Amino acid sequence: MQKVKVNYLFEGAVAQIILDDGKANILDIQMMSELTGLLASMNKMPDIKLITFEGAGKNFSFGASVAEHTEELSEKMLDTFHGLFYAIIDLNIPTLAKISGHCLGGGFELPLVCNFIFTDKSARIGQPEIVLGVFAPPASIILPMKVGYLKAEELLLTGKIIDAEEAKNMGLVNEVFEDKESMEQATNEWIEKYILPKSAASLKYAVGAVRLAFNKTMRESIPVLSDIYNNQMMKSKDANEGIKSFMEKRKPVWKNC
């Protein structure tokens, strides 16, 4: 089953990408590979001015697949996941995420790399990886750049889940709407006002310019954190216990090593 859908709107100027696995829109290796392939194909579509991401149903995404966080699969999972971020960076096309419901872990790191984030009041956002005994590599890079270390560390080290209003107050999202329908309508109006009148080529140059330091930091830091994740943390007892206990639906028994 294909897990990613795409619609081309506004006479092809906007690519609407929908995560849809029929359940919780889990970012597993299959979905991430489909997303990366789709984004790569957009390199040959010079008329695209905006890419939007959203989840089918009531939730954006419950996160990356916990079952693929095992020591045996983590390297492939992480490489595939990070390939998605490189694909977005390479495109330099403006990106916008529309969040309803749960948007957690790896499921939030995708919106986090976008230029714009819109939510409705049902949104519940967080990076709960630490609860499973692991950490979030892309979020560890992006959150401090977007909201500063004070709030970034609060989210990353506690794993707390926040609502849309708190996310907006900390500068994490651009707009909050009453519900999914009003968010959709307002987004379309925003696109018509702020995106469609612009040159697609000029938007790409502008994204590349405003994200010069951001992209440099991402490219330099992701390999470092991948190495820590795969070759240090996933060799620890607690990281594997955290994943195992989640899969077995029980409390973890930490060894602190």
Image: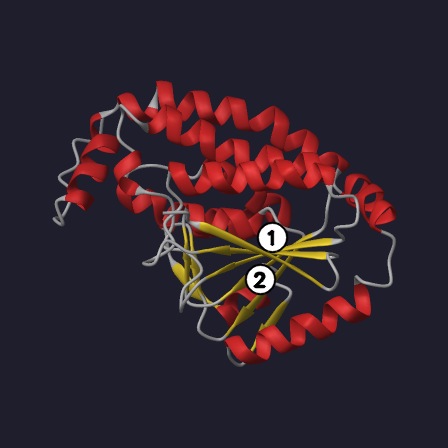
Using a 10 Å C-alpha cutoff, classify the residue at mark 2 as few (fewer than 14 neighbours), some (14 to 19) or many (20 or more). few
Residue 207 % position (x, y):
77, 45
Between 246 and 61, the residue placed more toward the observer is 61
Q: Residue at x 83, y 50 (%)?
A: 200
Q: Is residue 90 above or below residue 230?
A: below
Q: Is 231 left, or right, of 70 in this rendering? A: right
Amino acid under disc 1: Val
How many numbered marks are there?
A: 2
Between 247 and 46, the residue placed more toward the observer is 46
First along the sequence among labels 1 and 2: 1
Q: Is 55 left, or right, of 72 in this rendering? A: right
In the figure, residue 13 lies in which quadrant? bottom right
Q: Residue at x 30, y 25 (%)?
A: 234
- Identify residue for label 2: 170
Residue 140 % position (x, y):
50, 39
Residue 49 % position (x, y):
76, 53
Amino acid under disc 2: Met
Residue 237 % position (x, y):
20, 26
Which quadrant: the C terminus?
A: top left
Using a 10 Å C-alpha cutoff, classify the residue at mark 1 as few (fewer than 14 neighbours), some (14 to 19) or many (20 or more). some
Which numbered dot is residue 239? none
- Identify residue for label 1: 147
Q: Secondary structure at mark 1?
A: helix
Measure how far apart labels 1 and 2 are at the Cα level: 7 Å
Q: Are marks 1 and 2 in contact (CB under 8 Å)?
A: yes
Q: Is residue 248 above or below residue 52?
A: above
Q: Residue at x 48, y 27 (%)?
A: 225
Q: Is 198 left, or right, of 64 in this rendering? A: right
Q: Residue at x 62, y 24 (%)?
A: 220
Between 130 and 110, the residue placed more toward the observer is 110
User: Do we see residue 223 in this rendering?
Assistant: yes
